Amino acid sequence: MANDIRITILYDFYGEMLTEKQRDFLNYYYNDDLSLAEIAENEGITRQGVRDAIKRAEAQLYDMENKLGFVEKFEKIENRMNEIIDCADAINAYNLEHDLSREINESSVRIKSLALSVIE
């Protein structure tokens, strides 16, 4: 299951670099949840041909990630943005609890908003 999720994430980043047929097969298999036999019947090829095409496409996605690293970079950015959001929430909570400064409150809300805009 974790591999399925990883493939769909890689597909989101690199799918346009695959051939149309590879994209179709991955969509049928991962998004439409069709079996290899169902895809083979719909496409007029063997089940083994579908499996081989999917495995080649998956290998290409992993190869692109190994070379370019966009998913890893995005995940690091997302993690850091979530840490920034948590810090902004903590600053805001402390500020409100101690009734310190409206400016600090506004700034922490703005920081959180900016961080959320990066990852959404």
Image (tube, rainbow, N blue to C red):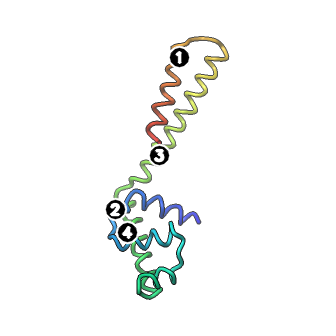
Q: Residues within 10 Å of mark 1 (few under 14, many from 20)?
A: some
The percent coordinates of residue 93 (x first, y second) are: 63, 23
In the displayed image of the protein, which residue is found farthest to the front? 42
Mark 4 or 2: in front is 2
Residue 22 image point, x, y percent: 38, 72
Rounded to the nearest angstrom, the CA distance separating label 3 from label 1 is 27 Å
Q: Earlier in the sequence, mark 2 or mark 3?
A: 2
Frontmost of labels 2 and 3 is 2
Local SS, label 3: helix
Judged from this view, the residue extending furthest toward the bottom is 46
Residue hosting label 4? 60
Label 4 crowd (10 A; few <14 / some 14-19 / many >=20): some
Asked if 97 appears above or below 40 in the picture, the reply is above
**Disc with the residue nearer the chain's start (3 vs 4):** 4
Q: Name the residue under label 2.
A: 16
Q: Quadrant of residue 59?
A: bottom left
Task: Tell me the distance, in whole angstroms, between the alpha carbons under discs 3 and 4.
Answer: 22 Å
Relative to 93, 51 lies left or right: left
The label on residue 104 is 1
Q: Is residue 102 above or below residue 42?
A: above
